Structure formats: C-alpha cells, structure tokens
Image (cartoon, rainbow, N blue to C red):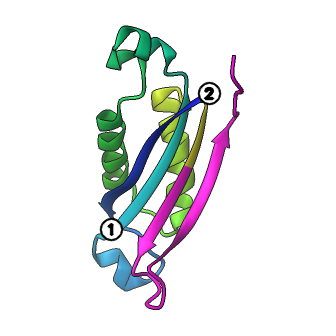
C-alpha cells in the first residue's frame, strides 16, 4: 500500500467544550496519511486514478464548516469516517491538533488510525 500525505492542513471550525468556545471559530491543524495504491495513477499520469489532495483538502474544510462538535475526538472520528466513505480510502491515520488550547503546550489533540492496512500486492 502507498500513502498519500497531507501535512499541517489548517481548517477553521467551531469546536470546544466551554461556552465561550462555542461563540468563535478556532483553528485546527491536521496531518493525514491516506492508504491507497498509486501505481495506476503513476502509470497513466492521471490524477483521476489517485487521491486528489486539493479535493480532499476542500472536503475537510467543508466538513469543518458543516459540523459543530465539542471534542477533538469527535471531530477526528467523524472526519475519518467521512473521508473513508467519500474517497474509498482503505486505511488512514489522522492527527488533529488544537493549537493554543493549553497555554503551556504548542497544541493538544488526537491521532487515530482507521481501516485495514493492506500489504504490498
């Protein structure tokens, strides 16, 4: 299996457990590793045969605009499910960071893996 990477993607969304957090948008920073097979795309030099970074990135921002959740964990879980369904992704690792949430830390967040890792075929 090959991995398509999207690193340090920034999206704005309403997220948080405190009342004051529900009144503003906050920045999340996402890292994604998306499992796919790039051989067909590479052979034909055809973006339609791989995972399109721009399309996926736009879908992530749309997801952030559409969902109003309290927990980073909920955001990560629902986003992972959405991406796997929308783009037929067999495996992914998603890290969601919330910068500035804890003053003494650069960021806090979660990292999850979903799907089935497929070895080389």
Q: Which residue lies furthest to the bottom in this view?
A: 104
The label on residue 27 is: 1
- In the image, residue 100 sits, relative to residue 46, either above or below, namely below
- In the image, residue 16 sits, relative to residue 61, either above or below, namely below
In this rendering, position of residue 20 left or right of residue 104: left
- Quarter of the figure with the C terminus: top right
Residue at image coords 46%, 53%: 31
Does the magenta run of residues contain 51? no
State the residue in front, 106 or 60: 106
State the residue in front, 28 or 19: 28
**Exactly how many numbered labels are in the figure?**
2
Residue at image coords 53%, 49%: 78
The residue where tag 2 is placed is: 1
Q: Position of residue 26 (x, y in %)?
A: 32, 71
Q: Quadrant of residue 12?
A: bottom left
SS class of the residue under badge 2? Answer: loop
The label on residue 111 is: none
Estimate the spatial distance between the alpha carbons at disc 2 and disc 1, rounded to whole Å: 31 Å
- In the image, residue 31 sits, relative to residue 101, either above or below, namely above
- Quarter of the figure with the N terminus: top right
Residue at image coords 37%, 79%: 21
Q: Nearer the viewer, mark 2 or mark 1?
A: 2
Does the magenta run of residues contain 99? yes
**Magenta stretch?**
94-121
Q: How crowded is mark 1: few (under 14 residues within 10 Å), some or many (20 or more)?
A: some
Mark 2 touches mark 1? (CB < 8 Å): no
SS class of the residue under badge 1? Answer: strand
Q: Where is residue 109 in the image (x, y as percent from the top left)?
A: 53, 69
Q: Position of residue 63 (x, y in %)?
A: 37, 48
Residue at image coords 29%, 37%: 54
């Amino acid at each position: 299996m090959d991995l398509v990477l999207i690193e340090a993607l920034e999206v704005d969304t309403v997220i948080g457990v405190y009342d004051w957090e529900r009144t503003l948008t906050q920045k999340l920073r996402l890292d994604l590793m998306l499992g796919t097979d790039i051989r067909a795309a590479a052979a034909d030099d055809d973006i339609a045969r791989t995972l399109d970074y721009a399309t996926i990135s736009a879908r992530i921002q749309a997801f952030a605009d559409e969902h109003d959740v309290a927990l980073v964990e909920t955001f990560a879980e629902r986003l992972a499910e959405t991406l796997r369904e929308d783009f037929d992704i067999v495996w992914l690792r998603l890290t969601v960071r919330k910068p500035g949430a804890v003053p003494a830390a650069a960021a806090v967040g979660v990292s999850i893996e979903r799907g089935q890792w497929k070895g080389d075929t």
